[in-house]
C-alpha cells in the first residue's frame, strides 16, 4: 500500500521536501517539463505583503509607492476584505518560489506544483522571456539597483531621488522596446564598461567622485559609449521608448539620474513579457497544478480530503463571474487560460468532427502535452487565443462580440455562433490581449537640441480613443521634469 505524503494540514520542512520530490517526478518524467532549479522559501504574511507590494521582487529599492501599496493591502487583509496570495514566483535562475507559511500542506503542494513547475517551465521556455529577460542576471541586477538608489538617496537626498523615480515609474510602460530587442552588450562588454569607468575616474582626479558613497562611485561616472547600442552618437526619430530617449539625450539629467532611468526601464523590459502572457502563464501554471494534484491522488500519494481541499481552491481560482454578476471585472485570465489548455487536451484525446476541421494538426493525436509545450514556448496571449480558441469553448463560455459605438443608443451584436462569427469573435478577443493597443502610442517626434531644446511628442490614438486631458498633462509634466525644457504633446486624433 502506498504511503501518503502527508496526513493532515500541518507541514514541516521534511514533508515539504518529500512532497516536492513527488511533484517533481510527475512534472519532469510524466509531463516532460523543463525547468530552472527551484529555490523554495516559506515566508510570513507580512513578508508576503512586502513581496508583492514591491513589484513582487525579492530585492527592490525603496520608493514611497511601495509603502503606500503595502499599507493598503495590509489594511484590507487585516479587515478581512482581501486574501493574501498563496505564492509569489520570480523569473530567475534558480527560480525563487515564496510559499505562505499559513498555507495548509495540501495548499503548499498546490503552490509548489503551480509555481515551481508551472510558472517555472513557462519562464524558461517561452520565447518572449528567452529574448527579453535575463533570468541568470536579474538577482544581481536588483541587488545593484537597490544599493545604487540607496547610495543616491544618501548623496543627493531622498526627495530629489524620489522625484526622478516618480517620473520614471509614471513612464514605465513607455520605457520598453516593443518591436526590436533592447541593446544588450555581452558580459565581457559590460565588464569592459565598468573597467573603462574606473579608468575614467582615476584619470579625472575629481574629488567629487572620491567622496561618493559605496555603490555610486564606479557607476555614476559619465557613460562610456556602448558599441552594442545602435543609436550611440545620434538620435533616430521617431522613438517610442521615451525613457530610453530621455536617458540618452536629456540635456538636464545628471549621470546618476540617467542610471536610475536605465534601472527603471530595465525593470519595465523585464516585466514586459509577463504583460503579454498573463493568460498563458497563469493558464499553464493552473493546468500543471491541476494535472499534478490529480496524479498525486491517482497514485495514492494524497488523501481524498487533500484532493477536495485542492479542488475547492482550484475552483475559486478559475471561477468566471457572469457579466451581470457584481463580482464581474472582465475575463478571468486563470479561467480562460486553464479552459483553453483543458480544451486542447480534449481535442487531442477525444475530438469531434468540428475539432478535426478546425485543428487538423493535432486533433486525435493523443499527445496533448506536446501541443501544450509547443504553445507555451512559441505563443503569447494574442496569438495563442487566435490559434487555439475553439468553437466548442466559445459556446461553453458563451462568447460573442459586441460593438459599442460612441453616441449610439444601444450595443450592436456583430459576431455570433456561426462559422464566420467564431473566427471573428476569436480575433476580436485576441486583440483585447494585444499590449500594444492597451498602452497609449506616444512617440518622440522631434527634439531641438541646438537652441530652444523643445521636445515634440505625438500621440496617435488606437481606434479613435483619445488621450484624457488630465492624463495628457500628467504625461507631459513627467517628461518635462526629466527633459528639463519645454515639452509639447500633439494629439494627432484631435479635431
Image (cartoon, rainbow, N blue to C red):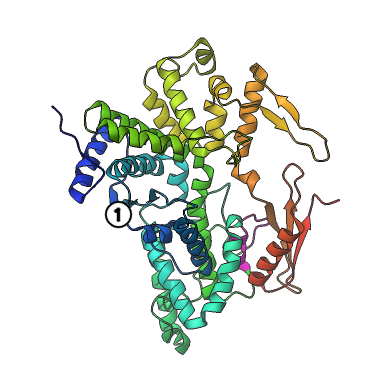
Q: Is residue 248 magenta?
A: yes
Q: Is residue 172 magenta?
A: no
Percent of width and height locating residue 73: 49, 58
The residue to which callout 1 is attached is 42
Percent of width and height locating residue 185: 45, 58
Sort mark 1 into few (<14), some (14-19) or many (20+) by Cα contacts within 10 Å. some
- SS state under label 1: strand
Query: Farthest residue toward the bottom?
Result: 207
Name the image quarter holding residue 430: top right
Residue 305 in sight from this viewpoint? yes
Q: Is residue 79 left or right of residue 95?
A: right
Compared to 23, does 339 lie above or below? above
Query: Farthest residue toward the right?
Result: 495
Magenta residues (range)? 235-249
What residue appears at the point 46 percent right and 14 percent down from the top-left corner? 351
Q: In this view, does 437 lie to the left or right of 30?
A: right
Amino acid at each position: 500500500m502506498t504511503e501518503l505524503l502527508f496526513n493532515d494540514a500541518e507541514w514541516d520542512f521534511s514533508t515539504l521536501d518529500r512532497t516536492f520530490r513527488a511533484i517533481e517526478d510527475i512534472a519532469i518524467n510524466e509531463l516532460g517539463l523543463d525547468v530552472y532549479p527551484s529555490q523554495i522559501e516559506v515566508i510570513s504574511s507580512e513578508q508576503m505583503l512586502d513581496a508583492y507590494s514591491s513589484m513582487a521582487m525579492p530585492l527592490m529599492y525603496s520608493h514611497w509607492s511601495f509603502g503606500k501599496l503595502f499599507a493598503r493591502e495590509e489594511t484590507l487583509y487585516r479587515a478581512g476584505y482581501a486574501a493574501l496570495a498563496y505564492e509569489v514566483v520570480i523569473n530567475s535562475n534558480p527560480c525563487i518560489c515564496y510559499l505562505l507559511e499559513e498555507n495548509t500542506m495540501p495548499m503548499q503542494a498546490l503552490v509548489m506544483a503551480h509555481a515551481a513547475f508551472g510558472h517555472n517551465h513557462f519562464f524558461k521556455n517561452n520565447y518572449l522571456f528567452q529574448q527579453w529577460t535575463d533570468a541568470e542576471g536579474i538577482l544581481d541586477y536588483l541587488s545593484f539597483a537597490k544599493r545604487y538608489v540607496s547610495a543616491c538617496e544618501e548623496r543627493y537626498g531622498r526627495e530629489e531621488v524620489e522625484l526622478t523615480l516618480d517620473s520614471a515609474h509614471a513612464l514605465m510602460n513607455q520605457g520598453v522596446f516593443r518591436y526590436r530587442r533592447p541593446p544588450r552588450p555581452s558580459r565581457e562588454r559590460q565588464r569592459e564598461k565598468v573597467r573603462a569607468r574606473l579608468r575614467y575616474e582615476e584619470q579625472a582626479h575629481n574629488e567629487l567622485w572620491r567622496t561618493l558613497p559605496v555603490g555610486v562611485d564606479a557607476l555614476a561616472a559619465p557613460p562610456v559609449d556602448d558599441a552594442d547600442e545602435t543609436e550611440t552618437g545620434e538620435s533616430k526619430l521617431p522613438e517610442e521608448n521615451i525613457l530610453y530617449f530621455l536617458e540618452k539625450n536629456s540635456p538636464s539629467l545628471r549621470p546618476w539620474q540617467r542610471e536610475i532611468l536605465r534601472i527603471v526601464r530595465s525593470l519595465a523590459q523585464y516585466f514586459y513579457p509577463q504583460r503579454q502572457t498573463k493568460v498563458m502563464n497563469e493558464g499553464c501554471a493552473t493546468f500543471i497544478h491541476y494535472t499534478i494534484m490529480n496524479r498525486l491522488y491517482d497514485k495514492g500519494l494524497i488523501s481524498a480530503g487533500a484532493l477536495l481541499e485542492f479542488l475547492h481552491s482550484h475552483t475559486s481560482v478559475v471561477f468566471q463571474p457572469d457579466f451581470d454578476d457584481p463580482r464581474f471585472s472582465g475575463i478571468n485570465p486563470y479561467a480562460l487560460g486553464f479552459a483553453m489548455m483543458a480544451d486542447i487536451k480534449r481535442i487531442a484525446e477525444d475530438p469531434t468532427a468540428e475539432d478535426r476541421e478546425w485543428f487538423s494538426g493535432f486533433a486525435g493525436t493523443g499527445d496533448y502535452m506536446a501541443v501544450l509545450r509547443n504553445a507555451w514556448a512559441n505563443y503569447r496571449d494574442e496569438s495563442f487565443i487566435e490559434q487555439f480558441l475553439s468553437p466548442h469553448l466559445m459556446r461553453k463560455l458563451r462568447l460573442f462580440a459586441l460593438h459599442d459605438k460612441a453616441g449610439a443608443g444601444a450595443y450592436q451584436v456583430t459576431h455570433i455562433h456561426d462559422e464566420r462569427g467564431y473566427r471573428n469573435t476569436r480575433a476580436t478577443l485576441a486583440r483585447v490581449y494585444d499590449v500594444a493597443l492597451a498602452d497609449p502610442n506616444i512617440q518622440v517626434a522631434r527634439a531641438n537640441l541646438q537652441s530652444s531644446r523643445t521636445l515634440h511628442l505625438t500621440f496617435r490614438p488606437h481606434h479613435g480613443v483619445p488621450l484624457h486631458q488630465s492624463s495628457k498633462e500628467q504625461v507631459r509634466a513627467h517628461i518635462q521634469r526629466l527633459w528639463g525644457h519645454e515639452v509639447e504633446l500633439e494629439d494627432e486624433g484631435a479635431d
